[in-house]
Amino acid sequence: MPLTLLRYGLRPRHVSFRDIPPTPELKRGYDVVIIGGGGHGLAAAYYLGKAHGIRNVAVLEKGYLAGGNTARNTTTIRSNYLTEESIRFYKEGVGLFATMSDDLGFNIMFSQRGQLTLAHSEGALRSFHLRAEMGKHMGTRTEVVDAKTVRDLCPHVNLDLGGLHEVTGGLWHADGGTARHDAVAWGYAKRAAELGVEIHQRTEVTGFRKAGDRVTHVVTGRGEIAAGQVLQAVGGLNGQVAEMAGFRLPIRCFPLQAMVTQPLKPFLDILLSSADLHTYLVQSSRGEIVIGGGSDPYQLASTRSTLDQKEHLAEGALHLFPFLHQVKLLRQWTGITDMTPDYSPIMGASPLQNYWLDCGWGTWGFKATPVAGKRMAEAVATGRVPDLLRPFDLRRFDRFALVNEMGATAASH
Amino acid sequence: MKLLTCPINGPRNITEFQYLGPVRGASAERAGELVEALFYHENPLGPLKEWWRHTPSNTVFIAERHTVSDEILATWLPNRRPD
Ligand SMILES: Cc1cc2nc3c(=O)[nH]c(=O)nc-3n(C[C@H](O)[C@H](O)[C@H](O)COP(=O)(O)OP(=O)(O)OC[C@H]3O[C@@H](n4cnc5c(N)ncnc54)[C@H](O)[C@@H]3O)c2cc1C
């Protein structure tokens, strides 16, 4: 990679190139139609072409590429979940991030700087012990640390000794990190397109034609196309698109908000989160402080923001770093998240024969972009759902076999 | 500040209210509807009837709200739906 760059830089005349080809005409049909051009859909497209030689594939995106939650997330990558099923899955995801820049030849700026979640109570510490033990058992780097280690890891944090939110310790996850969200999507899109996958932007799916329990055609704003297999990965609108296909999902839409400050000198070189304050912070490579937290209090399918939620995020951030009190906010935004009852995704088969689900990613799915793409491609290509994904089957709700990750998800995503 | 009209106390800041979720079509007491009642909540793009509680006065009531525009269309006490 660096050598190629050097050679390119030294070349007297630069040939311009574009990473993502312009949207082509729709063909009459495709072996696989992927609905949703976010990170998940694009990763699946890449792996279908790369690992399974399936290249007659169309990705249909109603807006612009990766403009949904892939563009809006705060890029926390981690595997410190609670259940065995989740840790095994997310651990594979973290591993794929570590090699992604090399695999794609596209710099996704993965930075494995570790994530620290603060405990302000004995109760929080107890639940951290459980997560640390599960993490160790599953071979991830997750441990409970005391307040002194918290200070060493994050010298500027307000420990609030004797105060309402005194820091009693934390959960240190050395495997945690961040990556550039846009680059992840563009990297997959670029390489998928090179393999022959067609990426259709501004192409909204509006319905389906079915024969029995198979989808035969996908109806779009630009015409109808025949489909061998269909993969649905539409982020916040997963419930609605499933209804178009004729079945319901256990999903509710909630807004999730975030914001960034003006750039500051580097002072925070880990990901920091507090479950009690419902706030987490990370300093981007530009120096901006990215601030995120809990979801909106009620259901909504809109990307509007609220002052209440922004003030709440600011309050948490100021509690942890009081010296931020005069820092200005640069940008703020919202995404619509598709929340499941157990804070785990829905991956695998659907009630239809040739229709696959990669949805219910709620507030936590960026970190799963590579692993979900890779494993969903495997399911679509082979017709068999990989063991890694089986616990996340839609039918788990009928069996009351939930994968409960609420406690390990709520404040950190 | 977003306002929500409590049928007893009138318009109040929405931060005074607790969201209790959609009014459910399915019943948790009928075996066949249990999974539906527990996990498959109403999630329309449009008007949604939902339970709210005005916390200071402990008034539980129903609001009809549009889930895309966030407009609150009507509020009423249970069983006292205005015509
Ligand atoms: C504020 C915020 C912070 C977050 N922070 C984190 C975090 O720190 N870590 C983490 O792991 N996750 C986080 N998430 C969650 C994460 O962003 C998502 O789970 C993930 O990006 C989902 O990717 P996706 O490709 O499935 O969906 P998306 O990126 O939303 O892509 C779906 C695409 O489908 C398209 N689409 C929808 N309907 C149609 C249709 N009918 N036809 C065609 N296309 C359609 C949309 O336009 C969209 O581009 C956060 C989310 C938000 C909102």
Image: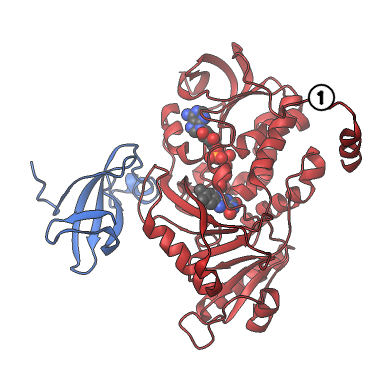
Chain colours: A red, B blue
B13 sits to left or right of A254: left
* Screen quadrant of the N terminus of chain A: top right
Which residue is rendered at x = 77% and y = 40% of the image? Answer: A106
- Give above or below for A108 relative to A7: below
> In the image as oriented, which residue stretches furthest toward the top?
A28
Q: Residues within 10 Å of mark 1 (few under 14, many from 20)?
A: few
Q: Which residue is mark 1?
A: A15
Which residue is rendered at x = 35% and y = 53% of the image? Answer: A298
- Give above or below for A54 relative to A409: above
- Give above or below for A161 relative to B38: below
- Residue closer to the observer: A107 or A362: A107
* Screen quadrant of the C terminus of chain A: bottom right
Q: Residue A98, can we see it?
A: yes
Residue A15: image location, x then y, percent: 81, 24
Residue A379: image location, x then y, percent: 66, 35
- Count of numbered badges drawn on the protein: 1
- Residue closer to the observer: A390 or A96: A96
Q: Residue A351, can we see it?
A: no
Residue A188 sits in which quadrant? top right
Q: Quadrant of ligand 1?
A: top right
- Looking at the picture, which amino acid does disc 1 mark? Val
Which residue is rendered at x = 77% and y = 51% of the image? Answer: A98
Residue A323 sits in which quadrant? bottom right
A290 sits to left or right of A185: left
Which residue is rendered at x = 32% and y = 42% of the image? Answer: B67
Residue A258: image location, x then y, percent: 50, 54
Residue B70: image location, x then y, percent: 30, 44
A103 sits to left or right of B63: right
- Helix, strand or loop for disc 1: loop
